[in-house]
Amino acid sequence: MKHLINYITLACILVMQACASSGPAQVAEVTALLSVGDSGMLVDGFEITVTNPSALRGLKAADFDLINNVPQGFVDPSTGQAPADYTDDGISIVRKKNVLTISCKPFSWEGKMGEGFRRIPWELRCAADTCLSVTPDKVTGRKTAVLDDCITGSFTYAGLTREYMLHLPKDKDGKVIPNVPLFVWQIGGGEYDKDLMTVATANRCLVSLPEEGVPCATLVFAIANPNYYYSASLHPDRIELIDRNNALQMAFIDQLIAEGKVDGSRLFCAGASSGGGCTIRFMMQFPDRFKAAIPCCSMDPVVPIHQVEEKYEGQYADDIEKAWKSPVVYKWNGSDMVLSEMDVDSFVKLPMFFVHAQSDRTCKVASSYAYKEARSRLGAKDDLLRIYSDEEMLSYGLPVWIAHFSWVPLLDDYSEGSPMDWMVKMM
């Protein structure tokens, strides 16, 4: 009789477990696993936390399907059309207690581009249990690779206060590695006067080196300037503000050096568009402090070039060379920004790798040729120039009409001879 009761009890328990496992999942949290893509956020997967773990039993990757999950890029390189959903979502799942982790091919957080540039939201569908289906509005939390490990704060100098985001590399034990190289990124005009997270996720400036496994600190500041626009070099107030921001960034870098976080002999700078121009001006101010720089699709930091036609071949380079021999840079003297002469010798000894797309319609490629030529005339011997063809830009999903985005191949490519490879080899 006693054994019969035990069997009945066991049977009841098994029936209860079976019933519980067949019930719908009771979802407590949905965390999106994100990373920074070429032009925004990517979804790499999800963590779904439930209150009834038994509901996760028996689930298979085949039970899940992603809708409107498109890779980043303005067009599909193979078709020239808007990116289509992945034919293979690359879904895999892992269950650990009450947490279901779903991994997939990275897709755009913003969803699929529809007619009239309208975004169609993505959706994760679960055929076995609709409670486990996910749409953007059901996401309750986010985990972002690299950025979640960054330090954020604000810094005041030269009469300005700016917010920053800093990534410091760590060893296998999770300890910050001291005295590492530093890569500082100058933001483009599209990110001016925006919040720090917008600045940090506009492109891969903070995450490119860490994701490549390079033990280098990366830094970006949110700059609250009016947009640094064409022919800004004709407006002393705009140029002074650019140089003031750069003075603030240099003071912060000096603090990192003093704290033993960064090696002052291995400082590197890059930036794109307006940030490409700011990179050049940064090097004009502090040419003896940096080891190398990569100005990308630069605007007009020294003389007007864009929206200006050359009166004769070589005029741009002539104008730049003349300007660099004049007092064209502002420096902080402890109480104010003062127009000063450049240290031309140090400036031309600092190697630069100019980057541009051949068909850039926003910042014409003639500017990079002119900057390089003017520096060569002044004695620069180690500069390089990389011009991306239309075919190269298209391979990144960037058609001619968006060829300005040459920072995408810049930050993605570490192949032999690429600008990032060139820089890493100096670290």
Image (cartoon, helix red, strand yellow):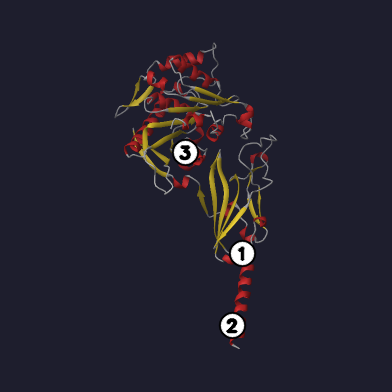
Q: Specify few, some or many for label 3: CA neighbours under 10 Å numbering under 14, 14-19, or 20 or more.
A: few
Q: Give the Cα separation between the discs numbered 1 and 2.
A: 26 Å
Tally of numbered tags: 3
Q: Residue lying furthest top in this view?
A: 312
Q: In the image, what residue occupies the spot 41% across and 44% down?
A: 152
Nearest to the eye among marks 1 and 3: give it: 3
Q: In the image, what residue occupies the spot 49% across and 29% down?
A: 422
* On-image quarter of the C terminus: top left
| Number of the label disc, if any, that sits on residue 214 | 3
For disc 1, the marked residue is 57
Q: Where is residue 142 in the image (x, y as percent from the top left)?
A: 51, 51
Q: Give the Cα separation between the discs numbered 1 and 3.
A: 40 Å
Nearest to the eye among marks 1 and 2: give it: 2
Q: Which amino acid does label 1 sit on?
A: Arg
Examine the image and state in which quarter residue 343 appears: top left
| Number of the label disc, if any, that sits on residue 6 | 2
Pick the front one: 261 or 402 = 261
Examine the image and state in which quarter residue 245 appears: top left
